[in-house]
Image (cartoon, rainbow, N blue to C red):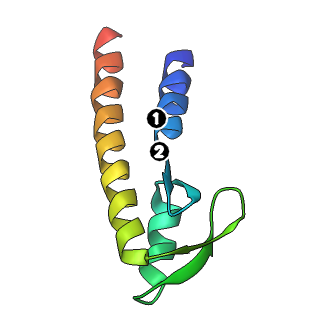
Amino acid sequence: MAARRVLKEKYQAKMLFAHAGGMWRAGPELLVLLATVPPGDAVILDLYETPVQINPEQLRGMAMMRWQEQMTAWLVEHEQLNKQR
């Protein structure tokens, strides 16, 4: 159980990224928010609750790419842990 918790913390930290002067966490919450924002520039709050002007399509693309890369890597490590048991 401790190994899985460490693995989760490792990949949650890798979901963080900077863009347009803000800090973001790739994940379902950000992706859903960005899907609801109309096209064109918008202002949303980053992780530190700072208003940041962003291009929703661009930020969504970056967040989706980060999310998929890290979730895939997490799955591989998770499966390796399961094989060790």
User: In what element is the residue under mark 2?
Assistant: loop
Give the answer, above or below, for where 65 lies relative to 73.
Answer: below
The residue under the point 46% across, 75% down is 34
Query: Which residue matches tag 2?
Result: 15
Q: Position of residue 18 (x, y in %)?
A: 51, 52
Q: Residue, x 28% and y 15% (percent of image)?
A: 83
| Nearer to us in this view, 58 or 82 | 58
**x and y percentages locating residue 58 in the rendered image:** 36, 70
**Residue 25 as seen in the image, left or right of residue 67:** right
Callout 1 touching callout 2 (CB < 8 Å): yes
Residue 61 coordinates in the image, percent (x, y):
32, 65
Q: How many marks?
A: 2
Q: Along the line of sight, which residue is nearer the eye, 34 or 40? A: 40
Circle 1 residues within 10 Å: few <14, some 14–19, many ≥20? some
Sort mark 2 into few (<14), some (14-19) or many (20+) by Cα contacts within 10 Å.
some
Residue 63 percent coordinates (x, y):
40, 58
Compared with residue 23, is residue 56 higher up or lower down, i.e. above or below? below
The residue type indicated by label 1 comes to Tyr
Look at label 2 and name its amino acid.
Met
Query: Mark 1 — residue?
Result: 11
Q: Is residue 75 left or right of residue 53?
A: left
* Mark number, residue 29: none
Instruction: Note whether 60 is above or below 4 in the view shown.
Output: below
Q: Quadrant of the C terminus?
A: top left
Question: The N terminus appears in which quarter of the rendering?
Answer: top right
